[in-house]
Amino acid sequence: MTTTQEPITTIPSTKPATSTPGSRSSMGNIRAPKFLSHPRANAKTGKSTKCKDWVLCIDDDQDFSYSMKLSLQTRGYNVARAQEVDKGYQLAFEIEPIAILLDLVMPNDGGDDLLSQIRFHPSLSHIPVFIVTGMYSSNVRDRLLASGACEVFRKPVDLDTITEAIEYHRPQA
């Protein structure tokens, strides 16, 4: 005689969860996911997920930004990526990253324009911006540092150097 088991169903609570990723929620044994696949985890309410460990990588080279994401994740950071300047600017408000890695040369708008916008907006001006580019000269570097970049890195990038720079310039809570 075989018995069939009924599938277990859960009823979502109307009470908002207040737990952090990977911790137990206030509702008992329900766990929040350890890793969020997208910065906006709560799409129903439209509220953004703010985490102090987010790094935003704005680069049109998908292979480069993906390799940066994998490398930084192994170092304990959550990484959001954007291939366009406008999307990167929007994500900066949504996730409040601890650092922004920004490519200088992008198809529609330049990274230097976005750097200026970030530096002049009161909600974003405290976020350290690191330029990561293949176009490198001392004149360009000096201009970008004068415009508010924390550092300018030349591709290919040494991940240990970027990680040290992120930690050094990390905004204090």
Image (tube, rainbow, N blue to C red):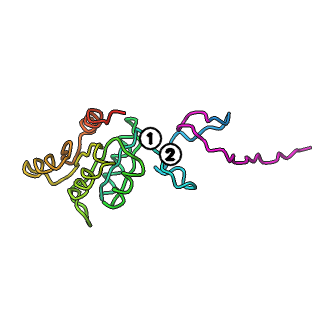
The residues colored magenta run: 1-25
Marked residue nearer the N-terminal end (2 or 1): 2
- Say left or right for 148 vs 76: left
As drawn, the residue found furthest toward the left would be 139
Residue 27: % across, % down: 67, 36
State the CA–CA distance, disc 2 to disc 1: 10 Å
Q: Indicate which label's residue lies in the foreground, 2 or 1.
A: 1
Q: Are dots 2 and 1 in contact, CB under 8 Å?
A: yes
Image point 30% across, 47% down: which residue?
Answer: 100
As drawn, the residue found furthest toward the bottom would be 108
Q: Sort mark 2 into few (<14), some (14-19) or many (20+) by Cα contacts within 10 Å.
A: some
Amino acid carrying mark 2 in the image? Leu
Task: Give the SS element for disc 1.
Answer: loop
Residue at the disc numbered 2: 36
Residue at the disc numbered 1: 51
12 within the magenta span: yes
66 within the magenta span: no
- Say left or right for 55 vs 155: right
Image quadrant in which the N terminus is located: top right
Image point 31% across, 54% down: which residue?
Answer: 58
